[in-house]
Image (cartoon, rainbow, N blue to C red):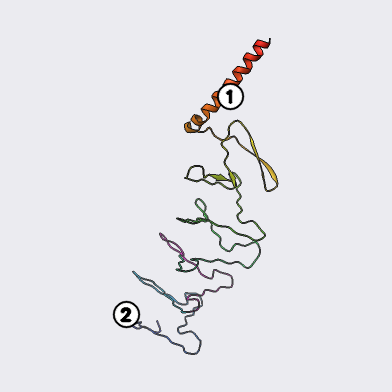
Amino acid sequence: MAVHELSSTTDAAVWGENTDGGPGVLGTSTDGVGVAGGSTNSIAVMARSTAADAVLGRSATGNGVRGQSSDANGVVGTSRNNDGVVGQALVFGKSGVYGTNPAGNGVLGVSHDGTGVLGQSRTGNGVRAESEDNDGVFGRAQAPRQERRLGLQRQRRRGRRLRHKLSGQRRVRAQPRRLGRAWRERQEPRRRRSNARAGQQRRVRHQSE
């Protein structure tokens, strides 16, 4: 080790300052880590800036910034007045933010009073979902009569195959599942009137014969 300094106070053991625009501290290495910071119970490396980026990572063929953790989040971004994490891709066909998980959620959005996940586009799809063996989009609402699936209000009908026009293609929805007792009780007066009309029509035909 070329330089070693020890400090028993809150002041830095090593201080580098540059008043012309160059780096205050520079660390380089051919095959190892250029600058390393370690801490047992606090932040290993901390950067501050008043008007520019506090940390900038650059790489020609590797990741600009990489975060790893065994039991906590790999990367966390927070902001008081702006977006916590922003991702931008400058090439066609690549994602600004890309999330992958072999068995869990690739991307998860959670909000207490706002939108969990929002997609917007001027000329393309705001939100696009694809699946090889399951539904492309599935939505569930806990509030009664608020469920939406594929952008269409769920229709409480039985015994019919409902057809909807989606994205220029004609698709057939399966019959809805059998409804609950409350719905059947509301439909009971209608069923009785229908049976009464049918009985009256049968009596009229019988008399005419």
Position of the N terminus by quadrant:
bottom left
Residue at 53% x, 66% y is 86
Q: Is residue 44 left or right of residue 131?
A: left
The amino acid beneath tag 2 is Thr
Residue furthest to the right in view is 168
Image position, residue 63 (x, y; %): 54, 68
The residue carrying pointer 1 sits among few (fewer than 14), some (14 to 19) or many (20 or more) residues within 10 Å by Cα, namely few
The residues colored magenta run 51-75
Viewer-proximal residue among 41 and 151: 151
The amino acid beneath tag 1 is Ser
Image position, residue 41 (x, y; %): 33, 69
Image position, residue 170 (x, y; %): 69, 42
Q: What is the secondary structure assignment of the residue under circle 2?
A: loop
Viewer-proximal residue among 193 and 83: 193
Image position, residue 199 (x, y; %): 59, 17
Q: Is residue 82 left or right of residue 123?
A: left
Label at residue 194: 1
Quarter residue 135 falls in? top right
Position of the C terminus by quadrant:
top right
Magenta stretch, main secondary structure, is: loop
Asked whether the residues under the numbered discs 1 and 2 touch, taking CB atoms below 8 Å apart as contact, a structural biologist would say no
Alpha carbon separation for disc pair 1 and 2: 86 Å
Task: Identify the residue under disc 2.
Answer: 10
